[in-house]
Amino acid sequence: MASLRLAIQKSGRLSEKSLDIIAECGIHFSNSSKRLVAKCSNFPLEILYLRDDDIPGYVADGVADIGIVGENVLIEKEKQVSVVKKLGFSKCRLSLAIPRGEKYHGVSDMEGKYIATSYPNILKQYFKEHGVKADVHEISGSVEIAPAINLADAICDIVSTGSTLIGNGLKEVEVVMRSEAILFSTSNLEAEKQAILDQLIFRIESVNKARKNKYIVLNAPERSVDTILQILPGMKSPTVTPLAEDNWYSVSSVIAEDQFWEIIEQLKAAGAEGILVMPIEKMIL
Ligand code: PRT
Ligand code: ZN
């Protein structure tokens, strides 16, 4: 029987979350950092541990069938692959930054400037789109120190909190692209492997939906139930069950994580009591 080969980062910012997703899909594997390949015991999946920079090439060549990297790496490598799904973790941005004391009027300020980056292809494309002719130079690692040692006028690097830029006397002036971890596949996946990938995507989507929602149970007096039902969206409609105490009901539903606090406040104001909120493990719609 065919098995799908997934390439993930061996050790780095993407490793743990990539493995978490597989584990939350109920797939068992041995996670030994010394290994190059791990076979999953209860799903036709093999995990290849690689440097993130090598993953797009291996997937394009068919050495691995699918891979997880940051979009920044995937786009920079310019390989022929198919994007499957954004995964919502390792969010960051690729930004232009200049020394803090310098004035900035717009991207045209970069005309003729010497810019250091580990992402020359993305940056050259960005300048092309903005009609700017800049001198883009590839350097790998410690890009942020380039202006201080007079190696460059500006840099283009990954930013998350921004503290690395501040610590190096730089300021972020343009966001060149936004990035997050992405699942992608070789462009001509054979049918049997595509079927395994479809199963995997279904599981990932169930896990991700569950992460974005909470299960809520509360008690309410009869006079509050109508108002509470209007506040709660629910997958279909909330469940309402009478309690042993006269004129009291238990109401349960699913609410979105990002509306959580707002909804809780409204429910309390409407007369809800004994509110319980629980994480959802999987959500199959
Ligand atoms: O060894 P290997 O080649 O596999 O790993 P790597 O060192 O190339 O990559 P790694 O593990 O550092 O990052 C993997 C991916 O995580 C990147 O390609 C991004 O998609 C994503 N990511 C998310 C980040 C960051 N956040 C991040 N903050 N990648 C790098 N950084 C670095 C950035 O380069 C800069 O030095 O963190 C610093 C900035 O962070 P702040 O918080 O100070 O702004
Ligand atoms: Zn790398």
Image (spheres, grey):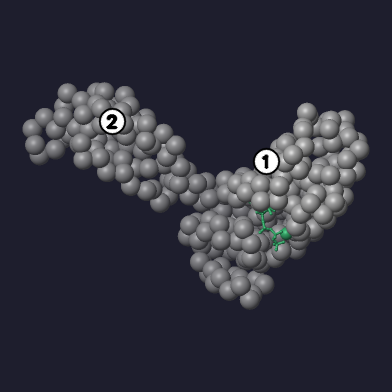
75 and 191: which is toward the camera: 75
Spot occupied by residue 239 in the image (x, y as percentages of width and height): 27, 35
Q: Quadrant of the N terminus?
A: bottom right
Residue at 66 percent of width and 47 percent of height: 166
Q: Report the number of discs.
A: 2
Q: Residue at x 77, y 32 (%)?
A: 104
Q: SS of the residue at dot 1?
A: strand
Determine whether 227 is above or below 99 in the image: above
- Quadrant location of residue 35? bottom right
**Residue 49 at x, y percent in the picture:** 66, 67
Q: Secondary structure at mark 2?
A: helix
Residue 83: horizontal and vertical position, in percent?
69, 45
Please, what is the three-letter code of the amino acid marked with disc 2? Leu
Q: Residue furthest front?
A: 101
Ligand 2 lies in quarter = bottom right
Nearer to me, 160 or 235: 160
Residue linked to disc 1: 178
Q: Position of residue 31 (x, y in %)?
A: 56, 70
Q: Residue at x 27, y 43 (%)?
A: 276
Q: Nearer the viewer, residue 73 or 110?
A: 110
**Badge 2 is on which residue?**
267
Q: Quadrant of residue 122?
A: top right
Any part of residue 118 in sight: no
Amino acid type indicated by mark 1: Arg
User: In front: 164, or 34?
Assistant: 164
Q: Residue at x 85, y 41 (%)?
A: 124
